[in-house]
Image (cartoon, helix red, strand yellow):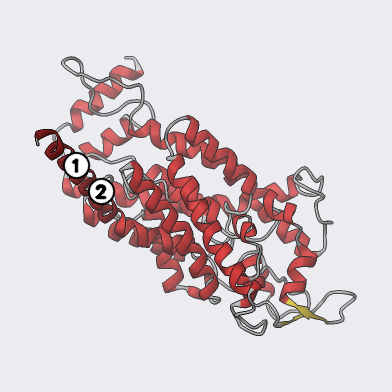
Amino acid sequence: MSLKSKLHTIKEKYKGTKMAPAFNALHTFLYLPNETTHNGTHIKVADDLKRTMNTVIMALVPCLIFGMFNAGYQHYLALGEIEAASGFFGASFWTLDNLILGAWQVLPLVIVSYGVGLAVEFLFAVIKGHEVEEGYLVTGMLVPLIVPVDIPLWMLTVAVIFGVVIGKEVFGGTGMNILNPALTIRAFLFFAYPTWMSGDQVWVHGAVERAGTPDAISGETLLGFYAKSGQELTIAGTNGGSEIVTTYGERAADLYSYWDMFWGLIPGSVGETSKILIIVGALFLIFTKIGSWRIMLSTVIGALAMGLIFNGVVDAGWIPETSKFFGLMSIPFWQHLIIGSILFGAVYMATDPVTASQTNKGKWIYGFLIGFISIMIRVFNPAYPEGVFLAILLMNVFAPTIDHYVVQANVKKRMKRLKVKTT
């Protein structure tokens, strides 16, 4: 008996049972939709939900692989065992040691994300008797890319369960949720375990274990440095064991160049650091017509606009250098795009077709407000200077309202035209 015949026999065996949705999900995974039309359709397309989700995953894979190399690189660099890489193609970055250490830390995050998330999806499919939806294929890949490399797996497990149940299943599953599930998971982690989602000990592997020891690793992100600009920073265990006292702003400038920020050779969440790879992913999504270029572009414009406003405030002398907001306000407006997660959020999160605005004009408004509010949160909340994920969640809630008013405005315009023609 052929494999196809065996699968058909098993499918018939489970047909009509509680486990049918779970089996159908495995049977059709990645290669065939469970329900297909044979005649009488007006529109036929080559893709389906699985293929759409797989396209986004392909755009995320380069960020995942780079994140593995960067996790190992930041660890060994902090220990002083390797020299800083000279650019994106530096010999000390693309080494097997970096990849092995990074994969050892990152792959468990991927396994837990997919394993726990899909288990919840299967459970709800069996309980409710509906088919397993493929929306979590992308969420499962996004979650490991937006968390620190050393986050405990049990925390990630709890957050994934919360995000899938509260952020998705309670609304009816894929296509019905009003909040991006991956961002719901990230928000849960931040509010439930804030010390593991901010600070200077969570972004570089091994920093937490070595905290307080002579060879302590400091893994503060650039946003953290700028948020603490002007404060004194004591670095122990360097320069032959002596202590070096400097300032956060100077330390950031000494450690990272603009090219380091652009290539991604900096601490941060696993997949957010390499801006060049995020841009490549954006072009791929735009080319395949999966991601909305309007949302991506308007988010960038909104971030730059808010950055320009803050630069104007600083240039006018309206805020003293001793202010806790001065560090992030004084950053050149364009530099906001190469530090933090604003580009990652604009490309992979804000463009989620389920939770984003659907009208073309609404997409411009939706994206602009995400970028604008992201930089505002970044500056005014130094305790958590990365605001893009909170901004996207906020605009997820308002996306239907934006579309409503856009549609109503179009209706009023057409009614006016009709009145003019009839008079």
Other-residue count near label 2 (Cα within 10 Å), few / some / many at <14 / 14–19 / ≥20: many
- Disc tally is 2
Seen at 29% across and 41% down, the residue is 133
In the rendering, which numbered label is found on residue 173?
Answer: 2
Q: Earlier in the sequence, mark 2 or mark 1?
A: 1
Determine if residue 217 is in view.
yes
Q: Is residue 118 left or right of residue 60?
A: left
In three-dimensional space, the C-alpha distance between marks 2 and 1, rounded to whole angstroms, equals 10 Å
Residue extending farthest right:
240
- Quarter of the image with the C terminus is top left
Depicted 307 relative to depicted 11: above or below: below
Q: Nearer the viewer, residue 301 or 278?
A: 301
Asked whether disc 2 touches disc 1, contact meaning CB atoms under 8 Å apart, the reply is: yes
For the residues carrying marks 2 and 1, which lies nearer the camera in this image?
2
The image shows residue 400 at horizontal and vertical percentages of: 26, 53
What amino acid is found at the position of numbered circle 1 in the picture? His
Q: Judge whether 355 appears above or below 250 on screen.
A: above
Q: Which residue is mark 1?
A: 130
Q: Amino acid at mark 2?
A: Gly
